[in-house]
Structure formats: C-alpha cells, structure tokens
Image (cartoon, rainbow, N blue to C red):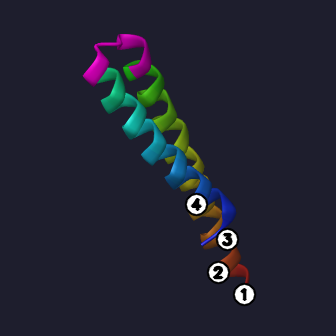
Amino acid sequence: MNKDQVNGKLQDIGGKIQEEAGKLVGSKEQQAKGLANQVEGKTQEKFGDAKEVIKDATN
C-alpha cells in the first residue's frame, strides 16, 4: 500500500463522516463538501492503485 492509497481512503472516510454530519444538522453545504471529499479521496486512492500496478509490473 502506498501513500496515495492511504491518504485517499482517509479522505473518503472523512468525507462520509462530513456528509453524515451535514445530514444530521441539516446543512446541504456540508453534505456537498463531504461528497466532494469522497470523490477526491476515491480518485487519489485509484491513482495509488495505478501506481502499485505499475510498480508491480516493473519488478
């Protein structure tokens, strides 16, 4: 596992928490920010996955 995979997963989880907190307090803005963080985190995680595939293919 590389840094991008770990950081992406953490950001995804943080985004889910932020989205749920936004739902609890009725804040559409926090829900949207949470969803955006989830997308960004998943993107970073996939980038990390691709880096691992390349690394494994060159070894």
Image mark for residue 54:
3
Taking 44 as reference, is 58 left or right?
right
Q: Residue visible at 43% across and 19% down?
A: 30
Contact check, label 4 and label 3, Cβ < 8 Å: no
Residue labelled with disc 4: 5
Q: Percent position (x, y) of residue 9?
A: 50, 54
Q: Residue visible at 26% across and 23% down?
A: 24
Three-letter amino acid code at the position of disc 3: Ile
Give the CA separation, mark 1 to mark 4: 19 Å
Residue labelled with disc 2: 56
Crowd class of label 1 (few under 14; some 14 to 19; many from 20; radius 10 Å): few
| Camera-nearest label, 4 or 3 | 4
Taking 10 as reference, is 24 left or right?
left
Contact check, label 3 and label 2, Cβ < 8 Å: yes
**Regarding mark 2 in the picture, which secondary structure is present there?**
helix
Give the CA separation, mark 1 to mark 3: 9 Å
Q: Percent position (x, y) of residue 18?
A: 42, 31
